[in-house]
């Protein structure tokens, strides 16, 4: 039963990735961040289905660790993409050269965290 659920989620994740390969996602776009967030949610669901804290799920702890490592790597990419998006917004908000002060940058960083 659990094996079927895992295989089903794996097939669905593969379909999502294959669909997105044809779209040629670009880092630093909101679409890229949305796809990464969806993949993270799917991986978290697969990890939760392993139930590694129970006696029956103890044999899946290594797989759960690998899934968590993949989630961490994808979160890193997602954060990097968000930083790129925020820096684009910062560049766009600078209408005149030299009009951006240190206080403006501080305010921007406080509001977009």
Image (cartoon, helix red, strand yellow):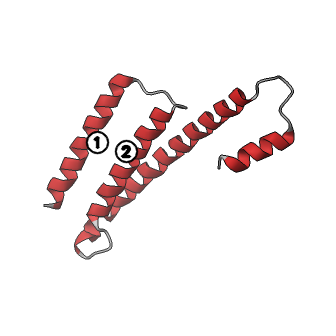
Q: Are marks 1 and 2 in contact (CB under 8 Å)?
A: yes
Where residue 60 sits: x, y (%)?
A: 28, 63
> Badge 1: how crowded within 10 Å, few (<14), some, or many (20+)?
some
Where residue 61 sits: x, y (%)?
A: 33, 65
Quarter where residue 14 is shown: top left
- Residue at screen point 37% across, 45% down: 39
Q: Quadrant of the N terminus?
A: bottom left
State which tag comes first along the sequence, 1 or 2: 1
Query: Do we see residue 63 in this rendering?
Result: no
Secondary structure under tag 2 reads: helix
Where residue 25 sits: x, y (%)?
A: 43, 27
Q: Measured along the vertical axis of the image, is residue 4 above or below residue 85?
A: below
Query: Do we see residue 82 in this rendering?
Result: yes
Residue ID for mark 2: 39
Secondary structure under tag 1 reads: helix
User: What distance separates the C-alpha of mark 1 from that of mark 2?
Assistant: 7 Å
Residue ID for mark 1: 13
**Front-most of residues 89 and 56:** 89
- Residue at screen point 70% across, 33% down: 90
């Amino acid at each position: 039963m659990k094996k079927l659920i895992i295989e089903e989620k794996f097939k669905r994740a593969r379909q999502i990735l294959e669909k997105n390969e044809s779209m040629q996602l670009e880092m630093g776009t909101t679409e890229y961040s949305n796809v990464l967030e969806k993949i993270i949610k799917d991986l978290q669901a697969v990890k939760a289905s392993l139930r590694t804290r129970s006696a029956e799920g103890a044999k899946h702890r290594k797989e759960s660790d690998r899934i968590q490592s993949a989630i961490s790597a994808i979160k890193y990419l997602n954060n990097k993409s968000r930083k790129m998006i925020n820096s684009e917004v910062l560049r766009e908000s600078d209408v005149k050269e030299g009009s951006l002060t240190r206080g403006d940058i501080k305010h921007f960083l406080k509001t977009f965290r």
